Amino acid sequence: MSWQNPWTEEHLRKNMGHWELRLDRMRFAEYPWAERRLYWLNDGGSHHFGAALYQACRLGITVPLTGRLCRYSVNVPMITALRQKWHLYAIPADEIFGSFFDAMNAFECPFGHSELPRNMHDTEKTGVALRLAWLERGHPRASAVADVLSAAGFPDFGKQLNLLSIQTAETISLERP
């Protein structure tokens, strides 16, 4: 017997009753900056959930879901502080460890690098892994590099963060209707 077949209410209930689903206490996250925005934070059993969803649609049965939705946002004061101290540019990961690194060494310019925050970039979709280059504002060489990166069209991640800074963080519970 597969997860989807047979298309019966009994089999639908069996899939929905899978111990890993925890349909009575589901957790969701909303990331306003992510393309899909809403994510189910499952602990397992997603194939049973997918099969149950498919069966419910085929059978025309409405299945109420309850859970907790966490809405995430950015920390506005922290963005302001980061932007006052750092120029932040998104650079292909292979360049950070390649020609960018070599150029920064040759120019004797200090910099840092890090991953992008979770759900801010889809490497699988774009085919390019990105990292952030951190260049200290007020440091003459770092500021010169920031000017070059800006002129060359590298994404200014600080500006992206500024656009997100108007979001507010909150957590709400979803109730059954």
Image (cartoon, rainbow, N blue to C red):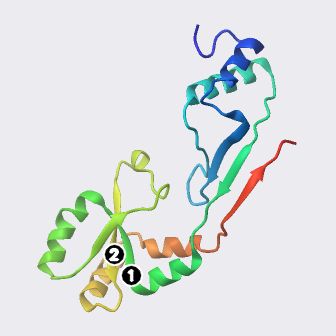
User: Is disc 2 placed on a helix, strand or loop?
Assistant: strand
Instruction: Please state the horizontal and vertical placement of residue 154, each as a whole percent of the image.
Output: 36, 70
Instruction: Please state the horizontal and vertical placement of residue 105, each as a whole percent of the image.
Output: 14, 76
- Density class for disc 1 (Cα within 10 Å; few <14, some 14-19, many ≥20) is many
Which residue position is annotated with label 1? 86
User: Dividing the picture into quarters, in which one does residue 151 lie?
Assistant: bottom left
Which residue position is annotated with label 2? 134
Q: Is residue 171 left or right of residue 1?
A: right
> Which mark is on residue 9?
none
Quadrant the N terminus occupies: top right
- Density class for disc 2 (Cα within 10 Å; few <14, some 14-19, many ≥20) is many
Q: Residue at x 59, y 49 (%)?
A: 36
Instruction: Please state the horizontal and vertical placement of residue 155, each as a whole percent of the image.
Output: 41, 69
Q: Is residue 103 left or right of residue 53?
A: left
Q: Residue at x 32, y 80 (%)?
A: 135
Q: Is disc 2 in contact with disc 1, using a CB cutoff of under 8 Å?
A: yes
167 versus 18 height, above or below? below
Q: Amino acid at mark 2?
A: Trp
* Distance in Å between CA atoms under marks 2 and 1: 6 Å
74 versus 143 height, above or below? above
Q: Residue at x 29, y 59 (%)?
A: 93
Quadrant the C terminus occupies: top right
Q: Is residue 109 left or right of residue 15?
A: left
Judged from this view, the residue extending furthest toward the front is 19
Q: Amino acid at mark 1?
A: Trp
Q: Residue at x 69, y 24 (%)?
A: 16
Question: Residue 82 versus residue 99: which sits nearer the camera?
Answer: 82
Instruction: Please state the horizontal and vertical placement of residue 45, each as a whole percent of the image.
Output: 57, 28
